[in-house]
Every structure is written in C-alpha cells, then in structure tokens.
Image: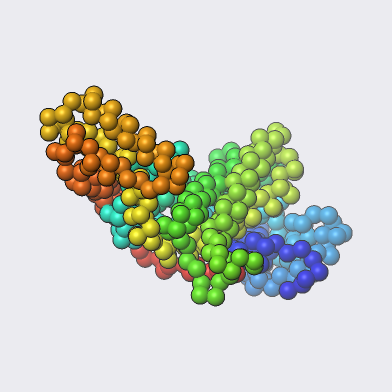
Amino acid sequence: MSHELYENPLVRRYASREMAELFSERRRIGLWRRLWLILAQTQRELGLPIRQEQIDELAAHLDDIDFAAAAAYERRLRHDVMAHVHAYGDVCPKARPIIHLGATSCYVTDNADLILMREGLTLVARRLVQVIDQLGRFAQRYRDLPCLSWTHLQPAQPTTVGRRACLWAQDFVLDLAEVEHRLASLRARSVKGTTGTQASFLQLFQGDHAKVRELEQRIARKLGFEGSYPITGQTYSRKVDAQVLDVLSGIAQSAHKLATDVRLLASRKELEEPFEEEQIGSSAMAYKRNPMRSERICGLARFVISLQSSAASTAAVQWLERSLDDSANRRLVIPQAFLAVDAVLVLLQNVTAALVVYPQVIAAHLREELPFMATENILMAAVRAGGDRQLLHERIRRHSQAVAQAIKEHGGRNDLLERLAADEAFAGVDLAAASDVRQFIGRAPQQVDEFLAEVVEPIRQRYAQLPPLMAELHV
C-alpha cells in the first residue's frame, strides 16, 4: 500500500472485498471484452462475415488485460474505450478488424454498468436479508420486554424492546422490496448504435430490420437480462441511475435511523452495540464506551444520501440524445454509493448480530415515568370504586405537578404512587395492579410474532439457499 497518494477509504477501510472487486477496473474491462466477444459471436450467428478463428481468439484473451498498454493508448487517443479496443486488438490480431463492429462506446460502458449495478444490488439484497434476519432474532428474544417509548424525544406509552427492533426491520423490509423491484426492472442497453437509432447495425445487415432486432434481443439474453430498454439515446436513460441511487439512499436512511436510535439508547445505558475486550472508547476518557460503529454507520449513510442528488441532477441535465458531463460524475457516484452502502450493511450485520440489552436499566427508567402514565388507569379504577371523576382528576393533577416540580427542581424521585396511596380518595384502588407495566404495552408482543411470521419468515425462505455473507470489518 502506498502512503504517498490519496487512497479511497471506502476500499481500504470500510467496504467488503466482494464489493470492491465488483467495481474494480479489472472487472469492468473484463466485462468490456466479454461484451465485444458476445457482439462478434451474435453478429456471426446472424450471418456477418466473422470467422470462428476470430471468435476463438477473442475468447482466449478475455482476462490477460495489459493495463499499461491501454493507458499508453489512452494518453495518445484521449479515449478510454478505443484505448482498450487497441489493447485487445494487439493480443487478438486476427480479430482486430471486427472488434467493436457497428458499436458505439456506450455498448460496452453502459451494458457493463448495468451488469455491475445488477450484481451490486444482488449483493446488497443479500446483506439486507441478513440484517433483517438478525433483527428478527433479536425481536423474538425481547418480544415482551417492556421499555419506555418516546415521541418528540419525550417519554410516551411503553413499548417492548422487540417491537422497537421490528420498527427498524420494517424499514429494511421496505428497502429490500425496492431493491428487488429495481433488479426486476433492470434491462440491457444491448445494441442501439450512436444515437439509439441502430442505423449502423441496419447498414451492417443491409437493411434487414428483423436481424437487427434479433441481434438486440439475443445480446440482451446473453447478458442475463429479460430484454433491453426499447428506446435510448446514445446512453440508456440516466433516470435508471437515479432510481438505483434512490434505493441505495433509502437503505442509508434506514441505517441512519437504526444507528441513531442505538446511539440514543446507549447514552441511557439501555442498549449497546458490541464492544470488544480491548477496544478503546476514547483516547482521553478511559471509561468511555462510545458507539463508534453506529456513529460510522451514520457518517457513511449521510454520504450515500448526499450522492442521491448527484444522480438526480445528472439525469435532469442530459441534453437531447446525450451529454458527456455524466461520465466523470458516474465514475465517482455509482461505485462509491455501492461501496458505502455495502460498508454500512457490513457494519449493521456486525452490530445487529450482538446488540447488548440491559433489562435492569430499562426497568429502572420505566419506573421513573410509569406512575404518570398510569394515572388514567388509576382514575378509572377510582371512579369504578365510587369516586367523583372531576374531583379525582384534580387530585391527580395536583399530586402529579408536585412530583414533577420536585424532580425538576430538587432531583427527587418519582413518588407519585406513594402520594396517591396516602390519599384517602384512592383508598379503594389497587395501585399496583393499575400500574402494572404490561397493561400499557398493548399488542406489542403479538405484533412482533405476527411481523416475524408474516413478513420476516417469507424473506428468510426466499433467500434460504444462499450462503450467509460475512460481516467483514476492516478496522
């Protein structure tokens, strides 16, 4: 590793090897050569004068790429695709005359990018499924552990730890549906020619429209797509890139939400991300257990969210049949969005696999707030015992305000139940029963069971045949 030049930390520190290799130069140019081979093969099948020995020569040199030779050509030609056409031709002299026949640069660049995005989304889907599965297991374990809920960052009606995990999982379920939709919607660019009219291919096949159409369909199938986009300019619509970035941004949004919640709960000592035996939380404060993985998730997620607008802007400014101002932008945005989302999901796999829960702290926090929440139940019970609703309401209000003032001004504890127990107006009320926390969690445990059975389990079954992906943390 060189320490003299900037290196992308997404590759060096964060993303998995699988994703980094997917968007490598070797993988991209290897796809270009395969696209040139498929083009020549299919043209020969449909009657163009291309010899089998030329096909065999192209097939024999798919992966012996001389990147230095291609770079030298590019310095002279100022064109990356033609540089690799020449480098391929150098090792395939018999096939040189028919490489890239009838094609424009976007035949290789766009089709390769569509394949890379398809493979990237497939990897993202598998990581999402693992996160959903792990959150499901966590939710099952803590399905009925009551905890304080929050709205407006103020204490609210209790929920359970497991149901809160289902909230997180639900967001990722929605993201998975979007990933699967985009995968099902992706098509090849196939062969469209310089401005999308297929004029060059129509000339090659001497005006035979049926053969040009067959060429397009066969190549799309050979690339693993159900078909090709029926209309393109020189490029496939950059709307497709924007839609893919929308999906990746959505995953980042869900991840940021979960990681932020973990950070908030860690500050209350209710829940923590995994913490290694020798991990250092702070260089100065030795006692600290900072949620650094969740913080990293948030940082990377914000980066992905910011890239969404770049893809949208690129789609918006493509002039007429195409504008080349998309090229440099896409080289940065698309790979880095995939790499960053991959890194986020790797971190999430690690965090969700070993979340630590502290039930006693959770119970203590509930005890601090529950008396206030129980007042409505206490009021109803006192009315059933023969009390006057309006008078009882006023007594509860006064006791509650006095307790709140004591807590805020003097750091006192919440003794509302004790005050009510000492008030003769509530003598006929079983305060312990009226303030049992399980009365306040509603159907939370049952909702967890239903969500796992009806939503999570079918996802597990759909992906059951795929081996799990490692949560590979670089640092």
Q: Nearer the viewer, residue 180 or 273?
A: 273
- Identify whether 304 is placed above or below 466: above
Residue found at x 12% / y 33%: 385
- Of all residues, the one furthest to the top in this rendering is 390
Question: Which percent across, then down, holds residue 251?
Answer: 51, 49
Q: Quadrant of residue 13?
A: bottom right
Q: Is residue 120 visible?
A: no
- Identify whether 359 is placed above or below 245: below
Q: Nearer the viewer, residue 150 or 168?
A: 150
- Of all residues, the one furthest to the right in this rendering is 76
Quadrant of image for the C terminus? bottom right
Using residue 453 as the reference point, say whether residue 7 is left or right of it.
right
- Identify whether 51 is placed above or below 217: below
Q: Nearer the viewer, residue 326 or 230?
A: 326
Colour mode of the rendering: rainbow
Q: Quadrant of residue 358?
A: bottom left
Question: Which percent across, then down, holds residue 465?
Answer: 37, 65
Residue found at x 49% / y 48%: 257
Using residue 77 as the reference point, say whether residue 288 is left or right of it.
left
Question: Which percent across, then down, holds residue 220?
Answer: 54, 52
- Identify whether 386 is placed above or below 280: above
Question: Which percent across, then down, holds residue 83?
Answer: 78, 60
Q: Nearer the viewer, residue 418 or 310?
A: 418
Quadrant of image for the N terminus? bottom right
Residue found at x 74% / y 49%: 328
Residue found at x 41% / y 57%: 270
